Image: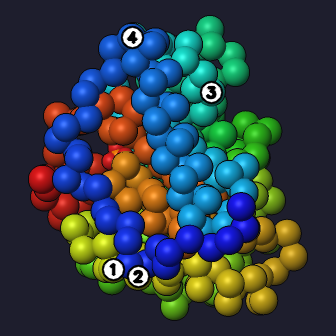
Amino acid sequence: MNTPGPDPSSSTPTRHDLHGRYRTAETVEDFRHNLAAVQSRIAAACERAGRDVASVRLLPVSKTIDEAHIRRAYAAGCRFLGENKVQEAHHKWEAMQDLADLRWSVIGHLQTNKAKLVARFASEFQALDSLRLAETLDRRLQQEGRSLDVFIQVNSSDEDSKYGLPPGQVDGFLQAMPQFGALRVRGLMTLAMFSAEAAQVRACFIRLRELRDRLRQTAPAGVELDGLSMGMSGDFEIAIEEGATVVRVGQAIFGARAVPDSHYWPGQDAHG
Ligand SMILES: *Cc1c(COP(=O)(O)O)cnc(C)c1O
């Protein structure tokens, strides 16, 4: 069990090629099947990396998916869903109030003027990337009498089009966090470079993990950096091999999206 397998760095490919081919999940049975398939890919990646499968949380990403399908995913066992756009997430939260144990994670860039929506309903926010946003979120949360788990988004690929703090600014950012009592820092989040070249994708994940390891030594008390949210349908196995504790997986569970990713990420063209 503990014997390391072949060096994963040379063998695990990205799977962006699969994107167009994930079939849309229609029935509760489809969802059960897809969730089990993703879980077994997670387990295999953990095995290769000598990691405990319980150290990786699967966050299903339901952006663009309608209420009827989300209810079937819920019936198949999903209790925590990721959404990229806050208004879309808020609408779904409102529509599914009857599913009292369904929680929401906002994983996409947030404009400060929409912080109050997140403060109202979200259980987790993974794209914290400015002090102004932290301050506004904290104030709104205090007003709601709520607190929020947050991940700080880091631009690990050096692409101008990506949101997130440059790695060199994260240390200073963390030092400011203790003043925001309603924000519980849980770790770092990133989107890897969009590339079929596994080595480039892996380099982004390694960068995030090494940054986290360095920052742990200087992080103020109360700021927890155990979490590494990285990896999606096309690259979550590589992310797990490099230490991901949360993988955000949409298409491999719900089916290929018709909406191009440029709708969600600035400067990102549709890819094959
Ligand atoms: C959409 C999205 C994902 C999931 O991408 P899939 O290709 O559907 O797995 C992960 N993270 C973020 C920030 C997203 O917006």
**The N terminus is located in which quarter?**
bottom right
Residue 112, given in percent of the width and then of the height, sits at 47, 55
Disc 1 and disc 2 in contact, CB within 8 angstroms: yes
Residue at 12% x, 53% y is 272
| Residue under the point 19% across and 37% down | 21
Regarding residue 62, the answer to whether it shows in the image is no
Q: Which amino acid does the dot numbered 4 rest on?
A: Thr
- Above or below, 163 relative to 57: below
Spot occupied by residue 240 in the image (x, y as percentages of width and height): 54, 62
Q: Would you say the beta carbon of the disc 2 residue lies within 8 angstroms of ligand 1?
A: no
Alpha carbon distance from label 3 to label 4: 17 Å
Q: CA distance from mark 1 to mark 4?
A: 36 Å
* Residue mark closest to the camera, 1 vs 2: 1
Going from N to C along the chain, the mark reached first, 3 or 4, is 4
Tell me the element at label 3.
loop
Q: Is mark 1 within 8 Å of ligand 1?
A: no
Residue 102 relative to residue 232: left or right:
right
Residue identifier under label 3: 79
Q: Which residue is mark 4?
A: 27
Disc 2: which residue: 203
The mark found on residue 84 in the picture is none
Q: CA distance from mark 3 to mark 2?
A: 32 Å
**CA gap, disc 3 to disc 1?**
33 Å
* Of callouts 3 and 2, the N-terminal one: 3
Q: Nearer the viewer, residue 135 or 201?
A: 201
